[in-house]
Image (spheres, rainbow, N blue to C red):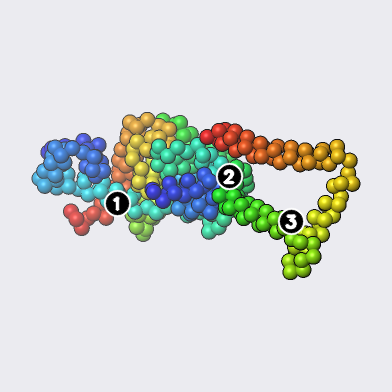
């Protein structure tokens, strides 16, 4: 009676044997009823091992895991919340409006009543400002103007450098 | 597997809901590995929970050069082993070289008393009574559908060691259950 190495049976069942080994086993099974029995016993075990089902944890297992998870680290976003393009468009519109209002206010005659309430308030404010400036000593008036110009320049420089260096660092 | 990658990248971005999807998908696999090692359902559930928490904390270190399931099962196995060492309740050492050679004696008694049960149930009970590594090998091979190479990686064993263990285990089971297996195949003979 021909014999088959026990390992070869499992290689045959797991489909990891060579074609030559396969042919040998199949020929043997066709010829020897005991070989067929050896195969069937192992195959039955193999089938029953494959049919085993997974164990199941308790119903609320996922919820328990999720409750036990640590809190996430909050991510600090460097990205602006509003798209810079939209901010620029918005600023341009606001600037245009302000310039228009100021230009309009400067060009209004004192006695013009058709300008409406906003223009009247602006006109009033401007006349107060016009009246206030001459009362100041020239040095203080100049200092106020210089401070305002300096602040404007500093703000612009800050925006410029922030944009340049922050972008380089993030790259 | 592709779905896993999507969920993993979402979890890496801080999406907890995606992680709950991963838990739902793998909870039974992880729990089964843990119960194969620890034998007790309560301890297995605790170990499975710890496994998922560990995975959540270290998911950024997962590089996706292997399957997520393989990584997850190896974390599950190590966590279960840690639990068993801590509780000192396992009767067999996982390093016991002889453990794979025989089914524990306790398994013979239930098998004899289960004449009326079908073979699938008997095999299930025998697997439960096996030592941790042996039971894990069978579970990973048959239910986890892992290759010998992957099992070796999960259990931190050599490939040849897993091959030999798998062969000996199945031969031992076949010899122990020959009576029941014959009953099953008698119509085919």
Secondary structure beneath disc 1? helix
Given the image, what chain letter belongs to the residue carrying mark 2?
A: A
Is residue B129 shown to the viewer in this render?
A: no
Nearer the observer: mark 1 or 2; the answer is 2
Image quarter for residue B152?
top left
> B92 or B50, which lies in front?
B50
User: Would residue A36 appear left or right of B45 to someone viewing this image?
Assistant: left
Badge 1 and badge 2 in a common chain: yes
The residue beneath circle 3 is A106
Q: Residue at x 30, y 43 (%)?
A: B175
Q: Residues within 10 Å of mark 3 (few under 14, many from 20)?
A: some
Q: Which mark is residue B9?
A: none
Image location of residue B71, percent across then percent down: 44, 40
Foreground of the two, B16 or B137: B16
Instruction: State the residue at coordinates (39%, 48%).
Output: B2
**Chain for numbered disc 1:** A
Q: Which residue is mark 2?
A: A79
Q: Which mark is residue A47?
A: 1
The residue that appears at 45% across and 53% down in the rendered structure is: B25
For the residues carrying marks 2 and 3, which lies nearer the camera in this image? 3
Asked if one can make out residue A159 in the rendered structure from this viewpoint, the answer is: yes
Separation (CA) of disc 2 from disc 3: 41 Å
Label 2 neighbour load within 10 Å: few <14, some 14-19, many 20+: few
Q: How many numbered badges does the structure rendering display?
A: 3
């Amino acid at each position: 009676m021909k014999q088959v190495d026990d390992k070869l049976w499992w290689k045959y069942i797991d489909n990891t044997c060579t074609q030559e080994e396969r042919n040998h086993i199949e020929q043997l099974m066709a010829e020897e009823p005991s070989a067929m029995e050896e195969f069937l016993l192992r195959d039955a075990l193999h089938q029953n091992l494959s049919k085993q089902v997974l164990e199941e944890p308790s119903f609320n297992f996922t919820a328990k895991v999720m409750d036990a998870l640590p809190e996430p680290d909050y991510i600090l976003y460097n990205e602006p919340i509003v798209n810079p393009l939209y901010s620029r468009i918005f600023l341009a519109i606001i600037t245009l409006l302000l310039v228009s209002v100021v230009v309009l206010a400067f060009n209004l005659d004192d006695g013009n009543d058709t300008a409406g309430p906003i223009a009247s308030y602006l006109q009033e404010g401007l006349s107060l400002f016009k009246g206030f400036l001459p009362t100041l000593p020239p040095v203080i008036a100049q200092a106020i103007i210089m401070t305002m110009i300096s602040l404007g320049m500093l703000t612009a420089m800050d925006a410029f450098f922030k944009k340049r260096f922050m972008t380089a660092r993030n790259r | 597997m592709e779905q896993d990658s999507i969920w993993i990248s979402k979890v890496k971005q801080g999406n907890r809901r995606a992680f709950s999807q991963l838990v739902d998908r793998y909870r039974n696999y992880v729990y089964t590995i843990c119960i194969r090692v620890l034998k007790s359902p309560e301890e297995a559930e605790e170990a499975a929970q710890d496994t998922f928490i560990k995975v959540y904390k270290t998911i950024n270190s997962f590089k996706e050069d292997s399957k997520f399931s393989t990584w997850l099962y190896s974390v599950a196995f190590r966590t279960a082993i840690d639990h068993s060492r801590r509780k000192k309740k396992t009767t067999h050492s996982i390093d016991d070289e002889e453990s794979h050679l025989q089914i524990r004696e306790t398994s013979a008694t239930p098998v004899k008393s289960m004449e009326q049960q079908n073979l699938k149930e008997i095999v299930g009970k025998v697997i439960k009574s096996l030592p941790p590594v042996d039971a894990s090998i069978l579970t990973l091979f048959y239910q986890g559908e892992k290759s010998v190479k992957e099992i070796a990686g999960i259990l931190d064993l050599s490939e040849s060691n897993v091959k030999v263990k798998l062969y000996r285990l199945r031969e031992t089971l076949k010899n122990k259950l020959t009576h029941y297996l014959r009953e099953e195949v008698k119509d085919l003979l």
